[in-house]
Image (tube, rainbow, N blue to C red):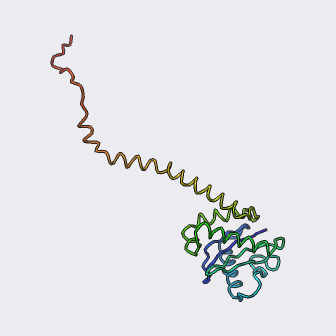
């Protein structure tokens, strides 16, 4: 089972963190720092798996990571997960991000955090792998984008209506209304 997914830059700044096991927020920050120190000090030509840090569970857990340009993608998993399977999952995640953002970079993770979390939720939910087929994932993301665009049209309707009313010259329109001639009150007799 996947316990956490962490993405941080070369300086240790977290760009994405998703924990599938409850940890207090201060412990989560310590886990991120410890994981960064464990992963960042490793050479590029060594194995991409290592034992988990003391905070995430020690030798019962593994850190499986990939380093792309300025970002580390780290999955903290228990011993039941396949190291090569998780490396493949990281590859699928990164390629999906790359297709969605057209050459993904660190800023995409910062400015489109909601979309990144949505993509991640298509791959992993509750610490379990849901989907590894990138075509299926991209299809779901495209469906979500279409839904958001259609809802944006509905959500924008009140604003367009207000704008249309503001563009109308209402006081002049009221003056231009032609009312029928009414009989004067002076000619009426009351009994």
Query: Furthest-left residue in view?
Result: 186
Q: Position of residue 140 (x, y in %)?
A: 66, 57
Q: Nearer the viewer, residue 173 or 13?
A: 173
Q: Nearer the viewer, residue 184 or 24?
A: 184
Q: Position of residue 40 (x, y in %)?
A: 68, 85
Residue 81 against residue 183 in the figure, above or below:
below
Determine whether, in the image, residue 158 is placed left or right of residue 31.
Answer: left
Q: Residue at x 61, y 74 (%)?
A: 15
Determine whether, in the image, residue 29 is placed left or right of residue 184.
Answer: right
Q: Residue at x 65, y 64 (%)?
A: 119
The picture quadrant where one finds residue 116 is bottom right
Determine whether, in the image, residue 102 is placed left or right of residue 3.
Answer: left
Residue 175 against residue 11 in the figure, above or below:
above
The picture quadrant where one finds residue 142 is bottom right
Q: Residue at x 79, y 71 (%)?
A: 85
Query: Furthest-right residue in view?
Result: 80
Q: Quadrant of the C terminus?
A: top left
The picture quadrant where one finds residue 50 is bottom right
């Amino acid at each position: 089972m996947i316990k956490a997914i962490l993405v941080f830059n070369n300086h240790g700044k977290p760009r994405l963190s998703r924990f599938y096991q409850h940890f207090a927020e201060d412990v989560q920050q310590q886990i991120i720092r410890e994981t960064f120190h464990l992963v960042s000090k490793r050479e590029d030509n060594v194995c991409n798996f290592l034992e988990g840090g003391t905070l995430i569970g020690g030798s019962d857990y593994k850190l499986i990571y990939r380093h792309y340009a300025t970002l580390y993608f780290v999955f903290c998993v228990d011993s039941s997960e396949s190291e090569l399977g998780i490396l493949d999952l990281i590859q699928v995640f990164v390629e999906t991000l790359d297709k969605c953002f057209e050459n993904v970079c660190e800023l995409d993770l910062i400015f489109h955090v909601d979309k990144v979390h949505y993509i991640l939720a298509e791959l992993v939910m509750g610490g379990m792998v849901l989907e590894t087929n990138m075509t299926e994932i991209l299809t779901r993301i495209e469906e979500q984008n279409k839904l958001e665009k259609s809802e944006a049209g509905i959500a924008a309707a009140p604003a367009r209506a207000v704008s249309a009313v503001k563009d109308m010259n209402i006081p002049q329109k009221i003056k231009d209304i032609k009312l029928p001639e009414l009989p004067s009150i002076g000619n009426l007799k009351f009994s």
